[in-house]
Amino acid sequence: MKKLRITIQGISYDVEVEVLADDDDTSGYGHAATNLYSPTPTVPSSAPMPRATPAATTAGGPKTLTAPLPGVIKEVKVKVGESVKTNAPVIIMEAMKMETVISSTLDGVIKEIKVAPAQSVQQGEILVTFE
């Protein structure tokens, strides 16, 4: 087994991979391709739900929380006027058939919520603004 870290759209995952065949040619070119992948990858049931931590921005305007990737809003966990702490869950969205918790990147008060459940959002779209 080899331990690897992969990053998919900014979210890092630590995985263990079983090597079924190893080619000593490390150049990546000029050797025959071998199917090393299982047709049904497995993820341990203890795998944590990914937590996205997009950056809060302050340049040229209000502090905002943006979508780290495209998806659909499943739940808004806060209300306008509510105080939140850093790392508190703010939005739950579904992306790539997985639920992702989008957490606050700062201590603040919710000024405006710009999304609603079932709404599709694009990467970088503003979800919440802070006072």
Image: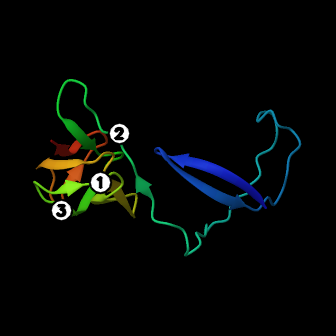
| Amino acid type for the residue under numbered disc 2 | Ala
Instruction: State the image quarter where residue 14 is shown.
Output: bottom right
Q: Where, quadrant-wise, is the N terminus in this rendering?
A: bottom right
Q: Position of residue 77 (x, y in %)?
A: 22, 63
Q: Which residue is mark 1?
A: 85
**81 sits left or right of 15 in the view:** left
Q: Kindly identify which residue carries mark 3.
A: 117
Residue found at x 24% / y 55%: 84
Q: Could you say which disc has been placed on residue 55 in the image?
A: 2
Say which mark, if any, is on residue 60. Answer: none
What residue type is disc 3 on?
Pro
Across and down, in percent, residue 110 comes to 16, 50
Give the residue at the far bottom of this rendering.
45
Question: Of the residues under marks 3 and 1, which one precedes in the sequence?
Answer: 1
- Decide which of 112, 12 is in the foreground and name it: 112
Query: Could you give the CA–CA distance between mark 2 and mark 1, rounded to whole angstroms?
Result: 15 Å
Q: Earlier in the sequence, mark 2 or mark 1?
A: 2
* Residue 41 screen position, x and y as percent: 61, 66
